[in-house]
Image: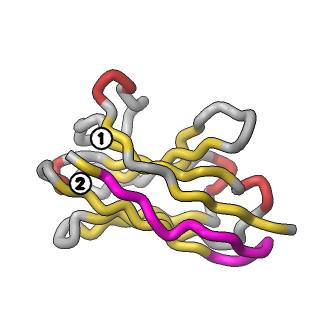
Amino acid sequence: VQLQASGGGQVQTGGPLRLSCAASGFAFGDYAIGWFRQAPGKEREGVSCISASVDRPAYVDSVKGRFTISRDNAKDTVYLQMDSLKPEDTAVYYCATDFSETCMVLDVSKAQWGQGTQVTVSS
């Protein structure tokens, strides 16, 4: 089981980035996938989640209207399109699944994490 996040980088305020999370080793299409982030000195927070059935993607309030999550089950990949980026979006971004079908609170004991990808937004 492996999740690999990519697509991070450094952008200016207002710019876009698209993160990708490529999965392998499990039935990707059967499970919800979430994006999380952790900024220096702060706790990890959930950013967005997409269920197996792709209904009602979830977003943390701070990114609603700016970030869009999607998935391509044919490519075993989840994307996070991030627009209108702000300095406060600066963090290491991770994708993860706890092998549930829906977007509920992540069961950390069952979670599989990808390695993070750094997003830096400069003002």
| Mark 1 vs mark 2, CA separation in Å | 8 Å
Q: Position of residue 61 (x, y in %)?
A: 65, 47
Asked whether, in this view, residue 54 is left or right of residue 36, the answer is left
- Which residue position is annotated with label 2? 53
Q: Which residue is painted at 60% across and 58% down in the image?
A: 118
Asked whether, in this view, residue 87 is left or right of residue 116, the answer is right
Per the rendering, the mark at residue 102 is 1
Outermost residue, right side = 123
The quadrant in which the N terminus is found is: top left
Residue 68 is covered by the magenta coloring? no
Asked whether, in this view, residue 10 is left or right of residue 53, the answer is right
Q: Which residue is painted at 78% across and 75% down in the image?
A: 12
Looking at the rendered structure, the kind of residue marked 1 is: Thr
Which residue is nearer to you in this view: 7 or 83?
7
User: Where does the magenta region start and end?
Assistant: 3-16
Q: Which residue is painted at 69% across and 71% down in the image?
A: 10
Q: Position of residue 34 (x, y in %)?
A: 41, 47
Looking at the rendered structure, the kind of residue marked 2 is: Ser
Asked whether, in this view, residue 104 is left or right of residue 72, the answer is right
